[in-house]
Structures are given as C-alpha cells and as structure tokens.
C-alpha cells in the first residue's frame, strides 16, 4: 500500500482519537442511560482491530490492523502492526503517538481535550457522555453519538453492542468519508494495570511536545 495512504490512515485515526465524534438521528433522552448501562461491565478490555477507510464512492482508500488495550478510567493503547508500525498510548495525563517507521514521538496533554476518544466511550465515562454528546439509537439499535461542540473533527460515531460485547465502530468524518473498525479476539478478563500503559520515548526518536 502506498506510504501516503498509510500515513493518511494513521492521521485519520489520530484525529479521531484526539478530536472526537458526532451526528445522529432523532435524539432520545434515555439513550445515554441505555448506553452507559450496556458499558457498565467494561472495566478492562483488550483485543485486535481491523480498520478500513472508504471514500464517497465506497472505495477502500486505506486500511490497517493491530491490537488495543483499555483500562477504565483514562488508559488505552492502540497499536498498528500492519501495514506500518505505530503506537498510540494514553494515560490520564498524556497522549503519546510513536511512529516507529519515522522514528518520531509526539506528546499531547490530555487535560483540555474537547471530546472523548472512542476508547473512552467504551470505558463508559458517564459524566463526559452526558456533557459532550447527544446519544441516540438508529434503526438497527446501534448507539450514535453527536457532539455538542461544533468544532469536533467528525460527523458521526456509531457503536454496535450486544450486551457488553462490542461489534465495532463506524465513524463519519467531515468530508463524509467513512472509517469502519472491526474488533476481534476480545478479552475482558485478563488483568491490566496502569503500568501496562507506561511509555518512554526511545532515545533515538525525534520528540515533539504539543500544546504545552
């Protein structure tokens, strides 16, 4: 796959993680309570993902796969293993992006973020969900989140759940391109601790600290 598409795919993912979600059908006040109840049992989660990005014609323009880890509240890791090698790690203080191929590391403060990340949504942060998003259900019973912030980077996040089992996510960006994320090999029982989300930049990486 051309490197430009690979980098664009990761840029799309990173924007999704940093900026957030949006757009929904008719809003029902109780949908956020239903979503929080469905997510209540998720305290820790890890598994694998496959992500595809589609243009307006439905053509796949980029795809990637890898693994993720989530520990509520405030910890997650998203690791792309193919077609390139990248790692995004967040703790309650910082979000790190390590591009291993380019040997760069970017650090951003978590405080002041304008929207929850998708993995934070899975963590069921009730206060942030109620504050930042209008939540509704679509015709297929999936949860759709719409941000109150008009500057959010995406138009729509759709989350599919069966009980506490996650089917996947679909994100519609501001250019009406769709990102579809499928989750597999999910494990909600293996122990995870904050130390599992520690990150130290490699000594040979170029460092960039943003918004500090």
Image (cartoon, rainbow, N blue to C red):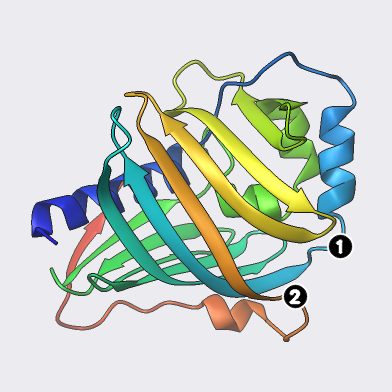
Q: Compare residues 82 and 115 and report the one nearer the observer.
A: 82
- Residue 103 visible in the picture: yes
Instruction: Name the quadrant of the N terminus.
Output: bottom left
Q: Which residue is mark 1?
A: 41
- Residue 212 visible in the picture: no
Q: Which residue is mark 2?
A: 188
Label 2: how many Cα within 10 Å (few below 14, some 14–19, many 20+): some
Q: Earlier in the sequence, mark 1 or mark 2?
A: 1
The percent position of residue 100, horizontal first and vertical second, equals 21, 74
In the rendered image, the vertical position of residue 141 relative to residue 6, given as above or below? above
Q: Residue at x 76, y 16 (%)?
A: 27
Q: Quadrant of residue 25?
A: top right
Q: Residue at x 40, y 36 (%)?
A: 178
Task: Decide if residue 38 is on the left or right side of residue 116.
Answer: right
SS assignment at label 1:
loop
In the rendered image, the vertical position of residue 41 relative to residue 195, given as above or below? above
The percent position of residue 160, horizontal first and vertical second, equals 68, 47
Q: Quadrant of residue 12?
A: top left
The percent position of residue 89, horizontal first and vertical second, equals 45, 66
SS assignment at label 2:
loop
Label 1: how many Cα within 10 Å (few below 14, some 14–19, many 20+): some
Task: Decide if residue 65 is on the left or right side of residue 33.
Answer: left
Q: CA distance from mark 1 to mark 2?
A: 9 Å
The percent position of residue 115, horizontal first and vertical second, equals 56, 35
Q: Residue at x 64, y 59 (%)?
A: 74
Q: Residue at x 60, y 53 (%)?
A: 168
Q: Are marks 1 and 2 in contact (CB under 8 Å)?
A: yes
């Amino acid at each position: 796959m051309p490197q430009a598409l690979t980098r664009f795919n990761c840029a799309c993912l990173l924007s999704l993680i940093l900026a957030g979600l949006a757009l929904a059908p008719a809003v029902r006040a109780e949908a956020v309570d239903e979503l929080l109840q469905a997510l209540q049992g998720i305290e820790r989660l890890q598994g694998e993902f496959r992500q595809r990005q589609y243009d307006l014609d439905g053509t796949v323009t980029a795809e990637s796969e890898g693994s993720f880890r989530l520990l509520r509240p405030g910890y997650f890791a998203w690791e792309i293993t193919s077609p390139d090698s990248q790692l995004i790690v967040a703790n309650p203080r910082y979000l790190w992006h390590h591009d291993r191929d380019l040997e760069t590391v970017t650090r951003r403060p978590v405080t002041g973020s304008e929207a929850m990340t998708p993995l934070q949504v899975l963590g069921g942060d009730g206060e942030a969900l109620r504050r930042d998003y209008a939540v509704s259900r679509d015709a297929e019973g999936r949860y759709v989140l719409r941000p109150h912030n008009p500057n959010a980077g995406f138009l729509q996040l759709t989350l599919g759940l069966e009980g506490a089992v996650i089917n996947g996510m679909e994100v519609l960006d501001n250019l009406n391109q769709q990102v579809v994320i499928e989750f597999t090999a999910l494990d909600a029982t293996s122990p995870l601790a904050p130390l599992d989300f520690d990150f130290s930049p490699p000594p040979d990486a170029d460092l960039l600290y943003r918004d500090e």
